[in-house]
Amino acid sequence: MIPTWRRIRARRVETSDTVTLELEHSPADAAPFRPGQFNMLTAPGIGEVPISMSGGAAPGAALLHTVRAVGAVSRALVALEPGAWIGVRGPYGTSWPVREARGGDVVIVAGGIGLAPLRPSVRAILDERDQYGEVVLLYGARSPSERLFPGELEEWRGRGLEVRSTVDVSEPGWRESVGVVTTLLPAARFSGPRSTAFVCGPEIMMRFVAMGLLERGVAPERLFVSLERNMQCGIGLCGHCQLGPLLVCRDGPVVSWKRAAPWLNVREL
Amino acid sequence: MSDLKPLLERHPFFAELTDSDLQLIVSCAKNVRFRAGVHLIREGDPANEFFLIRTGQVALEIFAPGRGAIDLQTVGPGEVIGYSWLFPPHIWQFSARTLEDVRALSIHGTCLRDKCDEDPRLGYRLMKRFAQVILQRLQATRLQLLDLYGKPT
């Protein structure tokens, strides 16, 4: 429960309210995280929040967290400059089934900042591209300028990924789709029954995306979502993130649709 | 025109229609192509057709003084453009501009409305198809209005 303290090596502004923090190496990095897992990050004197790793799964790679300024802690983290210290506990939680998806198609659907927790899985798949069939990334954002990693999206496209982006509100010069991300599903090239799906974004979006994926024949046990709840301890002790029988910090954040779906429409949870 | 029937059959919008339905519809259909950057339909013009997109992307847009054309939604292969031909005053409420070269089937509105009046079963089946597409668009629009990617309040 005690964080290690790391210095911020670099800070990259991604959008108007989102930055990626690159942390200095630590001996603890010898045990790299798995794509989809999170760390508890401490802003000194303010508090602690769960943030998924957005890069650095490979041994020796810089550890990256992409943080959006939403609450007091994340606003403080986003404001930190290179050289500042932050606390890190983790890695915690379950991961995207990148290895288990080998041999079939992969559909990755991201909304807004939801692309950040998916980025390590995209990179892992691209590193072994020949192990997979069709690989499709569908990305929805509020506007073109609020898309994360636009340069990388282009790079991925050149490395055998079908990348389709859509925005809720267009801007001059935007040449891709306008509309919600679910509208990209019918035309995307993948075979539902032989696909594994990774979905991360606002929960309402994930519910509609899941409906679209099930309609295309993706099996509920091969459809994975990343859940967000009030995670405080990160290790399944405090119970704040309970969702029915799940403790999201321990049994999630990555959970199959088969396990998650019965609990997502229960208003009392 | 009978050679258009296979194209109608292959388009998802007409999936599940019977052979005799398609025989009736094909006489109202024509194959059309548009270059990138042109308008299929313009806001305010009379609406007497709809389009089944076969290839290419189309932006639905509306004009706002001082802002120019605002893209509201994009529509691609397998989708439909145009409901205004169905209901009075039969005027397009939005414009549709091609983002790339587009191939489509254009279905003449008066022709099809007449066929539906003569054969209400066909009309019912077509209305169910349109209702389904309109429902999907309504749901998508509601999600768009929710501003899901905005900051939680």
Image (cartoon, rainbow, N blue to C red):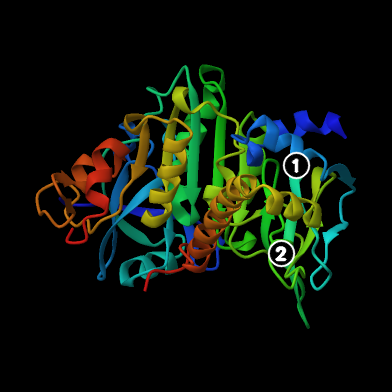
Question: As shown in the figure, which amino acid type bears the numbered disc 2?
Answer: Ser
At 34% from the left and 70% from the top, the residue drawn is A71
- The quadrant where residue B94 appears: bottom right
Residue that numbered label 2 is attached to? B84
At 79% from the left and 38% from the top, the residue drawn is B26
Image quadrant for the C terminus of chain B? bottom left
The answer to whether A134 is drawn above or below residue A155 in the figure is above
The answer to whether B3 is drawn above or below residue A27 in the figure is above
Q: Residue B97's x, y, as percent?
A: 81, 58
Residue that numbered label 1 is attached to? B25
Chain letter for the residue marked with disc 1 in the picture = B
Q: Viewer-proximal residue, A123 or A193? A: A193
Tag 2 secondary structure: loop
Q: Viewer-proximal residue, B97 or A104? A: B97
At 11% from the left and 53% from the top, the residue drawn is A239
Image quadrant for the N terminus of chain B? top right
Could you classify mark 1 by the number of other residues whose Cα lies within 10 Å: few (under 14), some (14-19), or many (20 or more)?
many
Question: As shown in the figure, which amino acid type bears the numbered disc 1?
Answer: Ile
- The quadrant where residue A203 appears: bottom left
Q: Residue A138's x, y, as percent?
A: 55, 43
